[in-house]
Image: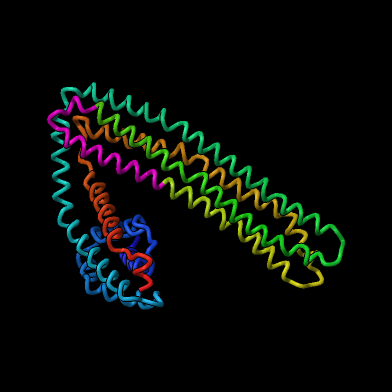
Amino acid sequence: MSLKAASLALLALLALTGAHADVRADQVADVVWNYFTQLSSDAKETVDQLQQSEISKQLNTLFQANVQTVNSYASELQKQLILFATELHTRLAEESEKLKQQIHQELQDLRAQLTPFADEVHQQISKNIQELQARLTPYADELRTQVNQNAADLRRQLEPYAQELQAKLKENVDGFQTALTPYADELQQQINRKVEDVKEKLTPYADELKAKIDQSVGDLRKTLAPYTEDAQDKLNRQLEVLSFQMNKNAEELRAKLSEAAEDLRLKLSPYAQELSQKLADDTANLRTSLTPYVDGLSEKIDQQIEEFRQNVAPYGENFNKLLVQKVEEMRQKLGPHAGMAEDHLALLEKDVREKVASFLNAALPTAEQIEN
C-alpha cells in the first residue's frame, strides 16, 4: 500500500468512525498498522508532508464531504482519534529500535540459558510440533468436508431454478414472461441466503483453532519452563510473540473464509440480475434470446461453485502448515546459532492493536450519544 493510499484509507476509516458506532477495532488497527509501517519505511521528506496539521486538514475535508450530519460528539471524536493516531506513531517510532535491541538481548540470554539442554529442547519442541499437527489435522479435514458439503448443497438448492426456467420456456403458453419474472428475484434471494449459510458454517473454525493454539502454546511453556528457571520472563516474551502471530493467522483464516463466500455471492448474483434484465426486455423474440441463456445457466452456476470449492477446500491444510512453520521458526530462534529476529515488530503490532481497541472502547459513542 502506498503512503498516499494508506493515509487516505486511514482518513476514510476515521471519518467512518466519527459517523458510526459499530466500526470494528480490528478494522481500525489494520489500517493504522499499515499506515505506521508505511510511514516508517518512507523517506523523511515524505513523512514530513503528513504532519498532524496536514492530516487534520485532510480529515476535516473528507469528514465534511462524506458525513451528512456531524454532531458535536462525532466532531470531537474525530479530533481525538487523529491526535491519538499521530501520538501513537510518534511513540512507536521512538520505541521501535529500543525494543528491537531489548528483544535481541533477551533472546541471546535465553539461548545461553538453553544451550546446555539444546538437544532436549530441540526434541521437546519437535514433540510439540507433532502434537500441534495431530490437533489441527482433524479440523483441516473437517473444513474440507464442510466446504465440499456446502458446495454440494448449493448445487442442489440452486439447480432447480434453472430446471424450472427451462421447463417454463418449453411450455408454449401465453404470459410466460410474467410467469418467469418471479424466478429472478427468488434466485437472488436464494443466492444471498445460501451464501450466508456458508459463511455461518465456515467462520466458526477460527475460534476452534484459536483454542487449539492456546493449548499448544501453553503446553510449550510448561515443557520449556524447567530449562529456563532464570529466564522465564524472556521465554514468556517469545511465547507471547508466537501466540500473537498464530492467533493473527487464525483471524486471517476467518477473514479469508468470509471473503471467499462473499466473492461467491458476487459471482453468482449477476446471473440473477441478467435474467431479470432479459425478462424486462419486452420483445417479440424474448423466448428466442432467453432460451440459450437459461440452458447454460445451470452450468455457469455450477462452474462458480466448483471454483469456490477448489479454492477454499485447501485452506485448512495451508493454515496448519503455516502454524507449524511458526513453531519451527521458534525452535530455530532458540538454537545456539540463530540469527537476528524481528520479533519487536510483532510486539509493536500487538501493542497497536490493544491500544486501538482500548481507545475505541472508551471513545466510541453510545446510541444515546449519537442521537444527541
Query: Which of 56 and 344 lies nearest the eye of the viewer?
Result: 56
Q: Is residue 122 left or right of residue 228?
A: right
Whether residue 259 is visible to the viewer of this picture, yes or no, is: yes
Residue depicted at 21% across the width and 34% down the height:
338
Give yes or no for residue 236 being in the magenta stretch: yes
In the image, is residue 322 above or below residue 287? Answer: above
Q: Residue at x 60, y 45 (%)?
A: 306
Q: Can you see residue 5?
A: no
**Residue at the (80%, 58%) spot, across then down:** 168
Q: Position of residue 179 (x, y in %)?
A: 78, 63
Main SS of residues in magenta = helix
Percent of width and height locating residue 171: 85, 58
Q: How many marks?
A: 0
Question: Quarter holding the C terminus?
Answer: bottom left
Q: Where, by quadrant of the figure, is residue 279 drawn? A: bottom right
Q: Quadrant of the N terminus?
A: bottom left
Q: In which quadrant of the rendered view does residue 207 lie?
A: top left
Residue 341 quadrant: top left
Q: Is residue 302 left or right of residue 116?
A: right
Residue 267 position in % (x across, y down): 58, 56
Q: Tell me: 9 left or right of 201.
A: left
Rendered location of residue 197, percent (x, y): 56, 49
Find the magenta span and give its range.
Answer: 224-252
Is residue 104 a member of the stretch shown in magenta?
A: no
Who is closer to the viewer here, 38 or 339?
Answer: 38
User: What colour scheme was applied to this rendering of the protein?
Assistant: rainbow
